[in-house]
Image: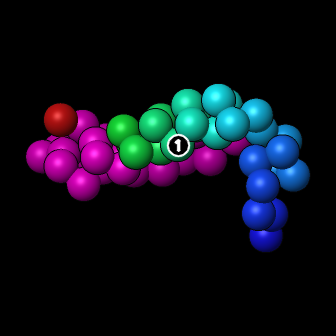
Amino acid sequence: MQNAPEQAGYTPEELQTRFAQLQLQKNIIETATKRAECRNETGVRSTVGVG
């Protein structure tokens, strides 16, 4: 596990942006009323919520 954003290859700004994106995805998954299947950036299928 890496402790500093620089060790993970992120600038502090990039880390903040990525964190905001993940928070949004988490909120969508937790509050969705319907489920849909999609592919993430690695091509792996997953089920996510659709508002």
Q: In screen coordinates, is 46 left or right of 8?
A: left
Q: How many numbered markers are drawn? A: 1
At which x and y percent is residue 42? Answer: 70, 41
Q: Can residue 39 be seen here?
A: no
Q: Is residue 2 above or below residue 46?
A: below
At which x and y percent is residue 27? Answer: 28, 46
Q: Can residue 24 be seen here?
A: yes
Q: In screen coordinates, is 17 left or right of 3?
A: left
Image quadrant containing the C terminus = top left
At which x and y percent is residue 6? Answer: 84, 45
Taking the magenta stretch, the answer to whether it contains residue 28 is yes
Q: Residue lying farthest left?
A: 33
Q: In screen coordinates, is 38 left or right of 36?
A: right
Residue for point 69% across, 36% down: 12
At which x and y percent is residue 32? Answer: 19, 45
Residue for point 47% across, 35% down: 21
Residue for point 40% across, 45% down: 23
Question: Dot 1 corresponds to which residue?
Answer: 19
Per the image, label 1 sits on a secondary structure element best described as helix
Question: Mark 1: few, some, or many residues within 10 Å (few <14, many ≥20)?
Answer: few
Q: Residue lying farthest bottom?
A: 1
Report the amino acid beneath label 1: Phe
Image quadrant containing the N terminus = bottom right
Stretch in magenta: 26-50
Between 30 and 13, the residue placed more toward the observer is 13
Q: Is residue 16 above or below residue 23?
A: above
